[in-house]
Image (cartoon, rainbow, N blue to C red):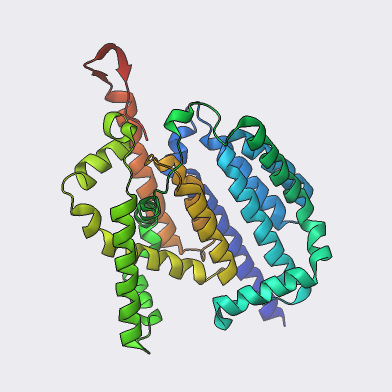
Amino acid sequence: MLFHQEEETKQFNELVTKCSITALVLVTFPVIYFFTFLYYTDTSSVFFVLLVYYLSLHGNHLTAALAGIVAIAVRQTNVIWVVFTAGVTALHTLQQNVGQASSGNSLGLLTELKKFCGGFVKHFFKLFKCLWPYGIVVVMFILFVMWNGGIVVGDRSQHKACLNFPQLFYLLLFTLSFSSPLLLFPSDIVDYLKSSKPVKKIYNLLGVVIIAIFIVLLVNKFTYIHEYLLADNRHYPFYVWRKLYARHWSVKYALIPLYMFAGFCIHHKLSAKQHCLWVLMFYSCVAIVTVPQKLLEFRYFIIPYLFFRLNIPLASYVRLVLEFLLYASVNAVTIHLFLNKPFQWTHNPEEVQRFMW
């Protein structure tokens, strides 16, 4: 009995240590770390969105909704993350109080979705007690949009919505790159191969081909290029686009296998910890937030990335150290370029320009 207690205490202490180290590492996540020192809204946006989610996990739904109002005031698209939090709250409530399976992936997505909808209707009043604060926030946001004549506050000409589906694929590569210590170990590759059991090889292959064709169509029909992406050489996306995507028309198609691999790795990690309905809600909200954006801007990926990173299994100490070294290296290069490599535009030589995210 004493041995089991000591073992449980040891496991708990290790869990706390890993969580603390993970938090410290994520503080240095390059995109958000850089803007911590500048007058940008990204830091406050991330803080209040994560605060909404944290408070909801601890049952403080009214306070979470109030934090959601501030999050939306900082950045209007954060209303999607308030809705996501409400959806996760409903899922957790059914799991804890009604008997919805905590890891229902084995039953299949459609079965779990049907079970969730049935539970939502059957236990509506119990769920209403948790969800009404989020509902009020959403209603307030709708009233604001009606009064404002749209969601955009500021220069609407540069923030026109479109169906830029390749934004999802850029996000996949972004996530794969910054999570490479967590996703691309040799043991991970072996795990991926084992998880894709060739029970029905022909159907698996057919599914891959159909997905690839679908991505080709999306890339071909829905790739948008914002004028800022081609003109503003102060930011990383300008060089990513010019050095990679703009090299040849075929590059955007050649990267499709990498998109698919990244998607598989990310889904595999999320599914290892989260309920399939949580994953579905997360994917849906990520799509709603990113797809309408015409501009390729890595700041738009911060919150989706952090939600992914915080909701996968805890990494080993070795992986956390490698992740920190990756972040620190990128931060060092970016800050060096910002501080020590200023430049001037030929059409405006009087103003000093600086490289940043």
* Vertical comparison of 3 with 164: above or below: below
Q: Please state the total of marks drawn on the protein image.
A: 0
Q: Nearer the viewer, residue 216 or 184?
A: 216
Q: Residue at x 67, y 80 (%)?
A: 3
Q: Farthest residue in the top direction?
A: 350
Can you say which quadrant of the picture contains the C terminus?
top left
Q: Residue at x 45, y 47 (%)?
A: 301
Q: Nearer the viewer, residue 17 or 272?
A: 272
Q: Farthest residue in the bottom direction?
A: 199
Query: Residue 29: where, in percent of width, then height?
Result: 44, 45
Query: Residue 259: where, in percent of width, then height?
Result: 32, 61
Query: Residue 96: where, in percent of width, then height?
Result: 74, 71
Question: Left or right: where does residue 64 sit relative to residue 253?
Answer: right
Q: Residue at x 68, y 66 (%)?
A: 91
Q: Residue at x 78, y 47 (%)?
A: 62
Image quadrant assignment for residue 9: bottom right
* Vertical comparison of 240 with 149: above or below: below
* Vertical comparison of 143 with 350: above or below: below
Query: Residue 268: where, in percent of width, then height?
Result: 44, 70
Question: Could one spot residue 233 in this view of the protein?
Answer: no
Can you say which quadrant of the picture contains the N terminus?
bottom right
